[in-house]
């Protein structure tokens, strides 16, 4: 937690917040914060700043904060991800949030097991919790939007063409002819497949909707590795704008 993200329910007054639970534990045990210490904070979907710890008990920490810095710019990326298996899903969510992905679409595909959609990690609370962990890691405040589409065909036929319009649209697919471009740095849509990959029919449908198949070389990467490799290749995180 490089930042404590403050939500409406944490606010106790003008410029005042109370931390409990995970963030309190982190403050006390990892950061070793004490009364009088200053810690980095951010307001969800707002600015970054710092807070003085004014009271600290076993149950809560009271903070007085000021916010004076904008968060980093969002990536101009729409990420379309075949629903990963539950164990990987949490980590992928955190990674996406830490990398600056703000628009995430979780879609079905033949190699996505139906049971993956039953995971409790898809509940609103768990989504928020894992996205928060990623934002706090990266010192960002802008909460990503997650869209869930449990049917492949209606999504690619009815919604995807509008999402690819006016953007560079790519589908990462091993074994295709075109290497993934580098530093696109503009509006982009990227599709990443499930552990078993997209089947040929699905790639054809994604191409019909405006996506260009691209590869990352001969090594087949796990989804959790492919996401940061692709984002790192398409967007220059050191550029002043990001
Ligand atoms: N078994 C599948 C690979 C699945 S890897 C196959 O051989 O096709 C999971 C997803 O990560 C892929 O669908 C793709 O979107 C992405 N990916 C992993 N390695 C890649 C590579 N070398 N080139 C392009 N995409 C890759």
Image: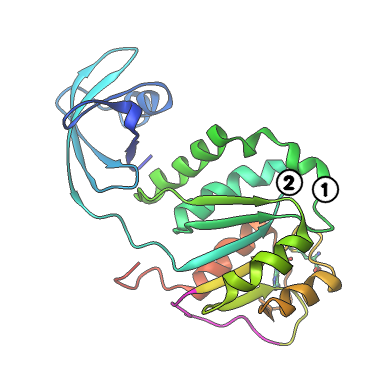
**What crowding class fits label 1: few (fewer than 14 Cα within 10 Å), some (14-19), or many (20 or more)?**
some
Farthest residue to the front: give it. Answer: 158
Is residue 236 shown above or below 78?
Answer: below
The image position of residue 65, as x and y in percent, is 18, 35
Q: Quadrant of ligand 1?
A: bottom right
Point out the stretch of residues depicted in magenta: 178-187
**What crowding class fits label 2: few (fewer than 14 Cα within 10 Å), some (14-19), or many (20 or more)?**
some
Query: According to the image, label 1 marks what residue?
Result: 113
Q: Residue shown at 52%/74% (left/top)?
A: 188
Query: Which secondary structure class fits the magenta region best?
Result: loop
Query: Does mark 2's beta carbon lie closer than 8 Å to ligand 1?
Result: no
Q: Residue shown at 72%/79% (left/top)?
A: 207
Q: Residue shown at 60%/43% (left/top)?
A: 90
Quadrant for residue 14, please give it: top left
Is 97 magenta? The answer is no
The mark lying in front, picked from 2 and 1, is: 1
The image position of residue 88, as x and y in percent, is 67, 46
Q: Locate the C terminus by quadrant.
A: bottom left
The image position of residue 116, as x and y in percent, is 76, 43
Marking on residue 182 = none
Q: Locate the N terminus by quadrant.
A: top left
């Amino acid at each position: 937690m490089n930042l404590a993200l403050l939500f409406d329910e944490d606010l106790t007054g003008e410029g005042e917040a109370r931390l409990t639970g995970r963030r309190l534990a982190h403050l006390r045990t990892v950061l070793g914060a004490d009364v009088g210490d200053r810690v980095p904070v951010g307001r969800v979907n707002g600015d970054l700043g710092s807070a003085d710890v004014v009271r600290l008990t076993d149950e809560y920490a009271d903070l007085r904060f000021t916010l004076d810095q904008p968060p980093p710019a969002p990536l101009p990326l729409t990420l379309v991800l075949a629903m990963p298996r539950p164990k990987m899903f949490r980590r992928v969510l955190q990674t996406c949030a830490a990398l600056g992905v703000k628009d995430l679409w979780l879609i079905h595909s033949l190699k996505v097991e139906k049971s993956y959609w039953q995971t409790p990690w898809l509940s609103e609370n768990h989504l928020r919790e894992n996205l928060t962990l990623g934002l706090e890691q990266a010192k960002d405040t802008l909460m990503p939007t997650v869209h869930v589409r449990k049917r492949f065909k209606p999504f690619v036929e009815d919604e995807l063409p509008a999402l690819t319009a006016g953007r560079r649209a790519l589908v990462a697919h091993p074994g295709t002819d075109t290497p993934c471009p580098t530093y696109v740095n503009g509006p982009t849509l990227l599709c990443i497949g499930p552990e078993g990959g997209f089947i040929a029919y699905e790639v054809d449908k994604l191409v019909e909707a405006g996506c260009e198949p691209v590869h990352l070389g001969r090594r087949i990467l796990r989804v959790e590795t492919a996401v940061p490799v692709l984002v790192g290749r398409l967007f220059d995180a050191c550029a002043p704008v990001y």
